[in-house]
Image (cartoon, rainbow, N blue to C red):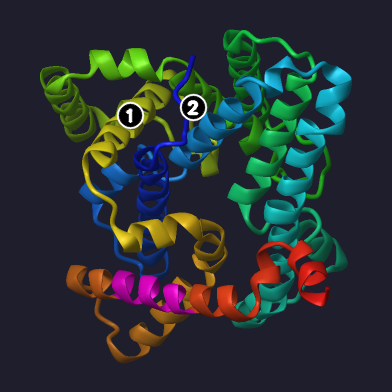
């Protein structure tokens, strides 16, 4: 059976890994809007980056739902308690904030581009969930897992097998240009990415299930060999690995390298002490994610007006500035507008 999360060090690695992923999301967006890329960093960060978020989500969801006493509940009890609570949390803490922030950035986005917009674009970008692909895909992926858990099957390989099949289906839909509606291939709610990312939720669940066994296997010598394999793979054979889920680029080698990099990072953060800044970012990843487009785009636009020439050191400076600005905004929102991340807080504050 998987390990409990009651120990503080277990929570630390989750927050630290989430923080690292978000820090590198900002790096990628800094590269995108500034227009300068550092290839060797991209090769490393893209192996885990957003994929590890799905891995962690699968780890936590399976831990909560397949552990006793929750797994002991029958289908009716699960629907009226475990499933209901999980669905409500996903709606209020992920889906609704995605819509709210989509509304906030919709009009400024088109104004900055100098483009006109249509009612269809407004619908698909806001309630259609196409503005923020990660949160949209995560919402649908977690809903799929909740639906599967109604079966009350205890064997995690049942869920993993279904997730692997759904990933294959999502990959097939994307590469054959099969869409639910003609408006957009990502409408509604980036369903193709949601299906493709199911494999990482399954791997997170499998890691939870066999965490004790994995820990026994990963001594310093095994870890050293795995690090060498990872570095050689990324440096010399990166073209064979497909793991950019936002673009629906995936193959088996890509899944394996993502799994390897994620496990190595987990082992690293289990060994290291807690860092307050990583804990803060890890506990507030939603706020950082919703700012990961607007902040880098704005900062890059300002910097390029004064320093038009591209330099690697300027990219690093912009990256740091973006994280600092985002941290300031997250602190402000946490203090004055916490309901942006959970509308239920408005009701509590009014009591």
Q: Residue at x 31, y 26 (%)?
A: 260
Dots 2, 1 in contact, CB < 8 A = no
- Examine the rendered structure and indicate whether residue 92 appears above or below residue 215: below
| Residue 18 image offset from top left, x and y in percent | 42, 48
Q: Is residue 323 magenta?
A: yes
Element on which disc 2 rests: helix
Residue 225 vs residue 270, the one in the foreground: 270
Examine the rendering and report whether any part of residue 236 can be seen.
Answer: yes
Which residue lies under the disc numbered 1? 263
Residue closer to the observer: 20 or 177: 20
The magenta segment is 318-328
Q: Position of residue 65 (x, y in %)?
A: 65, 26
Indicate which disc, 2 or 1, sits on the residue closer to the N terminus. Answer: 2
Count residues near mark 2 (Cα–Cα under 10 Å), then give few for <14, some for 14-19, many for 20+: many
Q: Position of residue 42 (x, y in %)?
A: 30, 48
Q: Residue at x 60, y 21 (%)?
A: 67
Query: Regarding mark 1 in the picture, which secondary structure is present there?
Result: helix
Q: Is residue 105 left or right of residue 187?
A: left
Inter-mark Cα distance, 2 to 1:
10 Å
Pick out the residue farthest to the bottom: 306
Residue 223 in the magenta stretch? The answer is no
Instruction: Report which quarter residue 196 is drawn in.
Output: top right
Quarter residue 264 falls in: top left
Judging by the rendered image, the residue that carries numbered circle 2 is 204
Q: Is residue 296 above or below residue 66?
A: below
* Point 38% across, 37% down: residue: 10
Task: Examine the rendering and report whether any part of residue 28 can be seen.
Answer: no
Chief SS of the magenta region: helix
């Amino acid at each position: 059976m998987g390990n409990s999360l009651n120990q503080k060090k277990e929570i630390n690695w989750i927050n630290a890994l989430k923080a690292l992923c978000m820090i590198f999301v900002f790096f990628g967006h800094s590269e995108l809007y500034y227009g300068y890329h550092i290839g060797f960093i991209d090769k490393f960060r893209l192996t885990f980056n957003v994929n590890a978020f799905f891995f962690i989500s699968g780890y936590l969801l399976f831990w909560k739902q397949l552990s006793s006493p929750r797994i002991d509940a029958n289908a009716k009890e699960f629907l009226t308690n475990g499933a209901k609570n999980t669905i409500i949390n996903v709606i209020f803490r992920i889906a609704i904030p995605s819509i709210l922030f989509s509304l906030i950035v919709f009009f400024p986005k088109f104004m900055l581009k100098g483009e006109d917009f249509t009612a269809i674009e407004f619908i698909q970008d806001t309630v259609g969930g196409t503005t923020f692909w990660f949160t949209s895909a995560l919402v649908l992926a977690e809903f799929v897992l909740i639906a599967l858990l109604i079966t009350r099957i205890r064997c995690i390989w049942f869920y993993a097998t279904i997730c692997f099949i759904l990933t294959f289906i999502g990959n097939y839909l994307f590469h054959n240009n099969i869409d639910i509606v003609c408006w957009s291939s990502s409408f509604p709610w980036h369903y193709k990415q949601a299906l493709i990312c199911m494999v990482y939720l399954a791997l997170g669940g499998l890691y939870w299930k066999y965490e004790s066994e994995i820990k026994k296997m990963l001594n310093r010598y095994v870890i050293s060999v795995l690090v060498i394999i990872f570095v050689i793979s990324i440096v010399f054979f990166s073209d064979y690995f497909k793991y950019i889920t936002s673009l629906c680029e995936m193959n088996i080698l890509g899944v394996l390298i993502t799994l390897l990099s994620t496990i190595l990072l987990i082992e690293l953060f289990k060994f290291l002490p807690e860092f307050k800044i990583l804990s803060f970012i890890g506990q507030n990843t939603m706020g950082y994610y919703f700012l990961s487009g607007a902040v880098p785009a704005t900062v890059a636009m300002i910097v390029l007006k004064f320093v038009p020439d591209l330099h690697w050191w300027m990219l690093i400076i912009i990256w740091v500035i973006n994280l600092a600005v985002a941290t300031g905004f997250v602190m402000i929102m946490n203090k004055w507008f916490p309901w942006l991340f959970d509308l239920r807080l408005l009701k509590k504050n009014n009591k």
